[in-house]
Amino acid sequence: MALLVKKFGGTSVGDIKKIKNIASSICQSKEAGNEIVVVVSAMGQTTDDLNCLAESISKNPNRRELDMLLSTGEQVTIALLSMALNEYGIPAISMTGSQVGIITESIHGKARILDIKTERIQNYINQGFVVVVAGFQGTTLSYTGSMEITTLGRGGSDTSAVALSTALGAETCEIYTDVPGVLTTDPRVVPNAKLLDEISCEEMLELASVGASVLHPRAVEIARNYGIKLCVKSSESDSSGGTLLESQIQPLPLKRGSLELTKTVNSLEVLENQAVFSLSNFPDRPGIAAQIFEKLSEASINVDLIIQATNDGNKNDITFTVSELEVKKTAEQCELITRQLGGEFNLKTNMTKLSIQGAGILGRPSVSADLFDTLSQANINVRLIATSEIKVSCVIEINNIPKVIRFVAEKFKLSDTQIFVNPINEKQDQPEVRGIALDKNQVQVSFRKLPDHPGVAASICLALAENDLLFDTIVQSERSSSLKTKDISFTMNKQDREKANLVFEALTKKLPGSYIEDGPAIAKVSTVGAGMAFKVGTAGKIFRALADQNINIEMIATSEIRTSCIVLEKDCDTAVNAIHNHFELEK
Ligand code: ADP
Ligand code: ASP
Ligand code: MG
């Protein structure tokens, strides 16, 4: 007898007819001899509607009260679905997060799950009940010691389902939704997006954290950490097998009390002998990035990090790193490029790339702040920064690498087995592009003319982190060395922008000469593929696809398996379609 956890999202339980249909399919699965726990979301757009109600009363509602309100959405669905199951003659019982014993941190609005008390739910399962659990919610002890309702963050029912699967030792966690599975991109943007039979947790984590709402990134993180078999399927038809997610890491033992709070950082990677090329002062118009990276690709140069900050006036800077072995070839190409396009380039060798990685970085801005703080305490000036939601990379100039490794490892409590110096990667047979995600919920902000000394990035990140402001895609541009200032650009959630004003004011006062500049309305288009790191020319192809549509790229930031381009919001759908077509993902 297999224990299955099945999760149904908002659209799938959008009306009574759908709830009845789901009850009937659960009924079949139960009659086939399975034990079943169901996790459901609020019906249709209920959570949005509840948010609107709150907003009509207060622009900044009390977080506790908001959780009280939002958690009611799921409570409606569990009761209705249980009734529907009862009508089919199936013993079923509904349970809220607190009745189950889903214990979370005491943070309202985005609590992480610490533990799930399985005794009561297991009892019902043993008695043959289908247990219907409200997703997205948990319970916590307040500072007075009394129980409080918490929510996990938008999209959090996926996380409830995978966490329950972990705690109950379920055989499979099935996420039923309104699409056939994980597709190459959002079918609302690209109608011929293709269903993926499988995807690695690493790739899904990147896609989910940059806008692929089909799975909550924290659900992917839990599945990866604990080796949960996770599949995404259509709630409408059973004809396709959906998408299977595979974890490539050794599963962790479940630690009671810190289910979702495994280490924030899982590994430290150091790559020595890197060269940083900075091309500056060339015109800011569509097609420049494509021309540059196509040239490099024609010369078989494998580019690692790419960073393009917002343009300064109508000029642009692009910085990228290559292995030192490729310096001569790359310099020759840069000569040609600057002769053709104008601008200049400079080159620094003997650089080191240091990256920390871990799904626990997600949603915790304090982690990048901690890294930059550690480096600045060691008096190391960070030359380049590129962050993704699960990885922070920086390029630094150091002679004493072992000392820096020791510092960072101590800070994040990493053991020797979690430290990789000049690793050789083995995932070379993976596709260069697996999927594309689109995030329209971002704004772009730049700090201009910052003093160039150790600790500047750290102080900005710390200030944002202390005020609970999430930031993404931080990009620090490398200016021509004559300028003793630097720019740091980043993207942040739209709804946080106003709240950030006070923090920005304080920071610009502390960093003389600097000022804040808001970018135009933008969207982030992220291309993800595990094979990207090994394939020469992927970035060039992405930039070409955009250039051919005359789309200007406002900002570029990469990690090993992801290239994110910030484009104007009006261009974003065209951008996703262009990249999708260019890599023929529909095939
Ligand atoms: P649910 O209510 O079932 O949790 P969501 O709306 O949260 O559903 O997520 C499903 C939606 O995610 C789809 O309708 C689709 O528009 C969107 N989506 C974005 N990216 C992808 C992708 N790569 N594959 C499938 N769906 C995607
Ligand atoms: N109902 C919540 C939301 O809309 C949780 C979820 O559906 O996963 O965000
Ligand atoms: Mg969802």
Image (tube, rainbow, N blue to C red):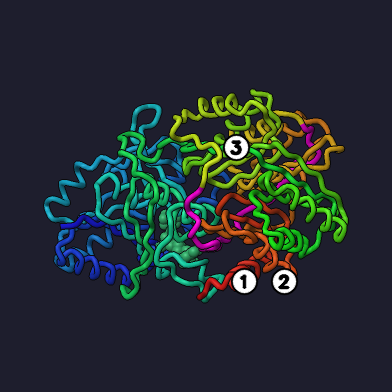
The amino acid sitting under disc 2 is Asp
The x and y percentages for residue 548 are: 72, 71
* Label 3 to label 2: alpha-carbon separation: 34 Å
In the rendered structure, which segment of residues is drawn in magenta? 425-452
Q: Closer to the camera: disc 3 or disc 2?
A: 3
Sequence-first tag of 2 and 1:
2
The x and y percentages for residue 136 are: 39, 50
Picture quadrant of ligand 3? bottom left
* Label 3 to label 1: alpha-carbon separation: 32 Å
The x and y percentages for residue 485 are: 81, 36
Q: Is residue 158 magenta?
A: no
In the picture of the structure, the residue carrying the numbered disc 3 is 354
The amino acid sitting under disc 1 is His
Q: Is residue 45 visible?
A: no
The label shown at residue 104 is none
Residue drawn at (39%, 46%) of the image: 249
